[in-house]
Every structure is written in C-alpha cells, then in structure tokens.
Image: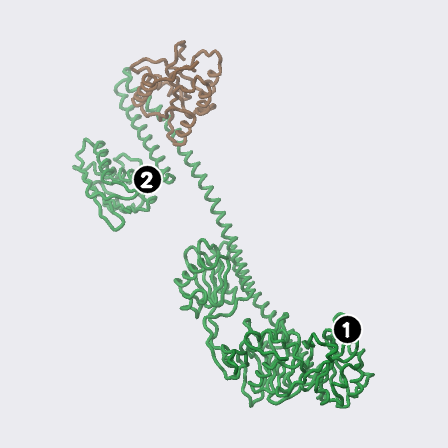
Amino acid sequence: MIENEKEIDLLYIEDNEDFVDFVGMAVRKLSTPLNYHFVTDGAKAKQILEDEKPTVPIKRAKLILLDYNLPGVSGMQLLQYIRSYPEMKHTPVVIFSSSDNPVDVATAYANGANAYLVKPLGMQNLKDTIQVVCDFWINKNQRCAQIA
Amino acid sequence: MDFKVDLSNCDREPIHIPGKVQAHAVLIGIDYKTQLITHVSDNVAKFFSCNPEQLLNQPFRVFLSLSGIDTREVNFLSLLPDQFVEGFEKENAWIVPTNGGRFHLVAHLSGPTVIVELEPAKEEDGREVQNIVGSLLSRILAAKSFQDTLDFSAQQIKNIIGYDRVMIYRFAEDGHGEVVAEKVNDEIESYLGLHYPASDIPKQARELYKKNLVRIIADVDATDAAIEVNNSITQATPLDMTDAVTRAVSPIHIQYLKNMGVKASFSVSLIADGELWGLIACHNYEPLLIDYRKRNSCRIIGQILSTSLIFRQEEVDNEQKAKFNTHLGNIIKHIRSDIDFKDALMQHGNSMLDITKGTGAALMFDNDIFMIGETPTQEQIRGIAAWLGEFNKNQFFQTTQLADLYPAASSFKDVASGLMSVAISREMKEYIFWFKKELPQTVRWAGNPNKPAEMGANGLLQISPRKSFEEWTEKVQGKSEGWQAHEISSVMQLREELVHIINERANQVRKLNEQLKQAYEELDTFSFTISHDLKTPLSSIKNYAELLIEEENLGNEHKPMLQKIVKGADRMNLLIREVLSYSRIGRLQMTVAPINMGQMLDEIRTELLNVYNSKPVRLTISNPVNIIGDYTMIYQVFTNIIGNAVKYSSAAEIPEVTVETQAGISEVTYIISDNGIGIDMKNGDQIFDLFKRMNNASPFEGTGVGLAIVKRIIEKHNARIWYESEPGNGTVFYLIFKTV
C-alpha cells in the first residue's frame, strides 16, 4: 500500500492479487505517473469508506476500478455503497471483470457504473487497456465539481 | 250443439260437452243438492216405459220405479256412497234388472250433477276377466319380445270384443301414428305398418283419451239422443260429459269412421309415463255394442299393457345404458392409463362408437381426423366442423336432420343425417362427432297426410276427415333416428373425462416447461461462471509468462518454453470462448431478417485473408444470394465453414476456396468447396459433434466446436447442411437457406 496524503488517481478494488500486481505494473508503465492505490477485499473497502478519518482519502479518488465478483461484500454491493455517499455520487466507477455475462453488464449499469470492461488476456493487452482507461477518465474526462 | 268445425278451430271443438248421448244408452242427470232430475236423454222411452216430461224435475226414485229397478239395489243415496273419500273411483256400476231387461247402470259426479248412464247388458260368455288378466301377465313376463306382448294383447282384445279388426297404434314424437300390431279377420285388408297423420287425432281428443281409457261407438249411423234439460234449473252451463262413458262422439270423428267404412269403433288408451303412448283401436264393419263389463276387461288389459310399456322401455334403456357404460368405462380406463387418447377412443370393440347407437364416429384432434364406422369423408367432416363452429356456440350439439340446418350435408345424408357432437376445444376446432344413418326411407301412410283439409261446399277450408285411406307412400328424407338421453349422457361424460385429462396433461407440460426454463437459466449462469473462473487463472498464467519473457536476466533457452505456455493459454482461452458461444446458441433470441450476403461474405473474406496474409489463398465468391436469418448467427456459420475451407486447404500449394450458389424457388443452396485435406465420409455426421476432430485434422489448430456451432445454428434456422468429400481430395459443403 502506498502511503500518500496526495489525492488518489486510481483506486483498484480487486481480490485477485495477481491482477492487483498486473494493473500495478501496467500503471507503472504509463506515460504519465499516477497515484495508484488498491484494496483487496470488499469488506475492507467498505470499512475505509465508513471511517470518519481514513488513513487513505479514497472518497476523493479520481477513478475507481472495481472487480465485479468480489467475495464477501460483492462488487455491486460496494458500488451501491459508494453511490450512497453524496461526494462519490459522480466518481467514475469502471467495472473490471473477466465475465462478459450480459446480465452482469446490465446489473452494473443499473447500479450506477460508468463503464464495464472485460479483463483482457495478456500483459500487452492489459497495458493498452489501462493506458486508454486512465487517459480517458483521469486526463480527458471532465469531473463533476464538488458542491460544498 | 251448433259448433261448426273448420281449420281455425278444429283443436277447440268442445267435444266434452256434446249435449248428446249415444243411441244405445240412456242418460239421466240429477242435481246433487235438490236430488231432482235435471237432464234426461230423449231416447229414454225407447228402453223404459217413461218419457222425459215425466222425469224432469222429479226425484230419481220416480225413474227407478217407472223403469222397474229395485230401489233396494240402487237408490239415490247409493249412487255415490263415498264421494268425499279420497281416491274415490270415478264411477260406480251395477248390473240391474229392469222392465226393459238387464242394464248396466253407471253413476259419476260432474260438477253439481250426478250423471247416471244406462246401457243394455249382454249375457256373460263365461270368459272371466281374471283368467285373461292372469294369462296376459304371465305372457308379458315371459314374452320373447315386446312385439310378442303387443300381438298377444291384440288377440286377447279381439277374443273379448269380437270386432273385425284390432290394431295397436303407436304415436311418434311428432304426433303421427303407426300401426305396430294388428289382429284382423282374414278377408279384410291389413293396416299393419301404416302411418296415420297427426291431424287424424286432434289435440283435445288426445287429452280425452288420457281421461277416458276406453271409448265405444257402437253404431256410427245411429242418431245420438239429445239430452233434455229442465230449463228452470240449468241454463248457463252445459253438462260436462268428460267422464260420461256413453258421451256422443264428435261428428268429425263419426265422418272419419264412415269414410273408412267402419260401423262400430272401440278404443283403449295406452299410457306410459302419463303420456298417450298409443291406442288399441278396434273396428267392426257392422254395428256392434261391447257392453260395459267387457269394455272394463279391455281397459284392464290396456292398463297392464301400459305398465309393461314402461317396464319394457326401461328394460331396453337399462340394457343399452349398461352397455354404453361398460364401453365408456373401458375407454376412460385406457385414457387414464396414459394410452394416447386417440388410440383409447379408436380401440376396436371399445371405441367411441360403442358408447352411442351412432353408426359412425370421428375424432378431430391436433388437426387430424380419425374415423370409425360409417362416416362422411375427412373433407366433409372438416366442413361440418367449420360450419358447427359458426352455428353452435355450445360444447354440445345434436340433430336428427343435419341437412336441414347445413345444406351441404345433403350430399352425405345417407351416412350422417343424425349428428351429435361434443367439443373438446372449440377454439382448436377439436371435436368428437357421432353420426346416424338416414332412416329407412319409405312411410306408408293411410291416405295423403299432407291434405288434412278439404274445401267445403261453402268454399271455406274445412277440416274434414280424409275420404281416402288408400295407402299413400311418402319418402322421408334426411332424417335419422333420435338421440336418446342415455346416449347424450354418455358422450357428455366422455367429454368431461377428456377435457379433464387434457388439462391435466397440459399442466404437466407447463410444469416441465417451467423446470426446463429454470434449468436453462441455471445452465446460463453456470457457463458464465465457469468461463469466468477459468479465464481468471488463465490470465495469470499468460501474463506471468509474458512478463518472464520480457525478463532480461532469463536465459534465452527458457524463452521458447514460456512462449509455449502463452500459446497454450491462448488456445485454452479460445476453447472457453467457443464452448460458451455454443452453449448459448440454443437460448439466444433470433432476430430473423433479410441478410445482404454479398456484403457479409466480403467482410468474412477480408477477415480471413488478413489471418492468412502470408499465404496465396484463392478465395472466390460468386453470385451471392440474400437469405433470411439472424445476422450474427449466419455470420458465425459462414466464418466457420469458409474458415475451415481455408484452414484445411492451407497445406495445398495454392489453397482454392470457392463459394457458389444455386437459387431455388424459395430457397438457395450455398456450395463451399476447397482443395484441402478432405473428410472420410465414413465419419458421417460425427463431424458436427462437439469436440469431435477428424484424424487427419490434428496438424491444424482447432477446438472441435466450430462445426457443432454451425449445426446448431442451421437447426435453429430450419436450414439444411451436408457435405461431400474424400480424404485428400477436398470437401464440398452444401447449405440450404430460405430466401423468403
């Protein structure tokens, strides 16, 4: 875990540690360096969100990459939970899953996901995907201003 | 009585108040309260030494003493001893000696009047009525047949009354009568089998036949005796002679008998279940009185016969009912034991035909028609069903004259004049029909039944008894025997049972369907989960392998092995994707629309040539014809078939693949040929099995799923696919699709 008071650029919530590593490696290869943060368990993510003085300012993450099939607190439960915070209502959440089940895709959008990506096979494909996603959502996409 | 009978009032002729008595009898009316004589027939002087003037307004005993009747035997008080007792016999009768000989004296009450009728009594002939009754009863019980009972009864009556002709006459539903039994003197023409039109016996006469069980007309030529009335007492109401046994007969009826040449007539009513079943009608060609006692004997015979009518009819009905029930029971048993109910209804000896007296039956079910016995043709039966759907909105229908309602039926009235039907489902046009043949066809009428009226002398139409009784035959057309209550109840029962079972089976199918749907959904989830769970570790394997390949510290000798891991992972990924795709075809919604095949094939061509860009593939597409289908699925089919053609001919020096078409009327055949390695035809359809790869295919990459997907899509489209091939000599695939 990267200890940093800086704003989080990319928060990845994923139980598969291999993928946490792969995405981490892909992020390191990006042209623009990013503040990357990951949580490997839905329940832990939920706990951090509830924490009034969190060690990590995840509520202000610029982009959340969320695994669909999380054990315990599932990806969809977590998504609903995220959307229940006013300050996270418009945080871009991209679902990152190896499933292309249309039912899952529809459920994700119904719960307020901004995009649904199927995990690509192969490192190069993964790097390309991460590059495109981060470029779009973090750099190009206009974020919704916080209304105090 | 000056009642003129014509067509408008014939049914209202007041035959119960004729104001006259037959010539052979004397009638005396006595007011019950004053006990004075109020009515006397004017023929009293012919029999007794007194006249009406001497009797009217006098006590009854005046008549008794003038006629020499012993008042110890009969007096006014003894006439109606128990009149207020419930169940009191209508009439009391005595045989009394008078100064004019022995007379039957019969008394009954009509309104305020005690009516006394006197008729000459004949000598007893020794035949005791008890004997006749006894032998008749035992004969009825032992009778071989109903006909036998009728014949025997007719003979007994003839023996008692000695008339020339004794007929038993039976009324049909429409009121016409038929002579069903007859005993007649040898020299006289028989009427057996003749039919009499309904108008021969008008309605009110029928009612009287139900009240007066016996009727005598001793001499049609004798002048009736008028009844003289004491005017001071009775003005308003004419004497009601409904129950008077010697009541004068309607002049119309007398004329009718005269026209027939009959001089004396006698009838006994036969009543079954409160209705006039028929008559024992007796004719004599000379005047002949049957005295009161003999008439009573005949009445008893009639009553016994009447009882046996009911008994006999019930016996016949019960026998029939039992037979129908047995067959019905067997059919139902078969249906319940899961036998296809078409078979259950058609089983020889226990078919739907055996639960009625129908001569043919047909089952219309699932758009098929199954027939048994004598029936109209399939086409004609479809015609009936179509007509019935419009004509009758009920589940049940029956007629005995189908052609009257449905004129097209006249062409097959011989087999189906009678129709009874139950609808299994009116919506689905599912019916069972029972047919009855046209009845035997000639009716022998006594005279022309269509001419009950003749022009009177005054130019008015008058009901006048037919003058001609010459046999007159008429062809009855398009009419079958009636459908009996127990036939109807047995088909209704069958229908209930069928509908119940059909519903039960439909529910089973519905349940199965739901289970199937659920299983499909589970399978769907299962395949996605499996593919997800398989793909995740696969990603790890491939990604780590790739990362290692890029690792600079790793020796070059290990890199090919890592490359093989990557390749293996790719292959597994492909396999997972294809299996998932295959499993989903069955459940995918098809969007069927015309497909621009030229465009699609071009796309596929470009894609394939990209994959094989290092090879000189010759891929020719000629005359693409548009087809109807689901775009994505058809795309998969052609990608697979053309892709295989290119793949398996890739070892050839110049792979040559051609796509041609042959257009038919509403379909097109796509012919895809290659110069590849070919397929051993012995493998037949196995090439379409999942994961099946031919022996000679192993050098080529593949999952064994592609052709299985093709086959499933083809089946979903109701299209056809087959191939011709020889190992080493290329393969030709034929695919037929619909173009409209």
Closer to us: B370 or B110: B110
The green-coloured chain is labelled B
Q: Earlier in the sequence, mark 1 or mark 2?
A: 1
Against B502, residue B148 (above or below) is below
User: At x 35% / y 40%, what residue is drawn?
Assistant: B590
Name the quarter where the N terminus of chain B is drawn.
bottom right
Gap in Å between the C-alphas at discs 1 and 2? 102 Å
Q: In the image as oriented, which residue stretches furthest toward the right?
A: B72
Q: Secondary structure at mark 1?
A: loop
The residue that mark 1 highlights is: B83
Residue type, label 2: Ile
User: Measured from the top left, where is residue B319 in percent x and y?
Assistant: 58, 68
Q: Which chain does tag 1 point to?
A: B
Residue B700 lies in quadrant: top left
Q: Which chain is brown?
A: A
Which chain is disc 2 placed on?
B
Residue B459 in picture, x, y percent from top left: 51, 80
**Pointer 2 local density, CA inside 10 Å: few below 14, some 14–19, many at least 20:** many
Instruction: Name the residue beneath numbered marker 2.
Output: B709
The answer to whether dots 1 and 2 both sit on one chain is yes
Task: Using the image, determine if residue B411 lies above or below residue A10.
Answer: below
Residue B302, horizontal then vertical, whole percent: 65, 78
Residue B614's quadrant in the figure?
A: top left
Q: Which numbered mark, 1 or 2, is in the foreground of this view?
A: 1
Q: Is residue B210 above or below residue B322?
A: below
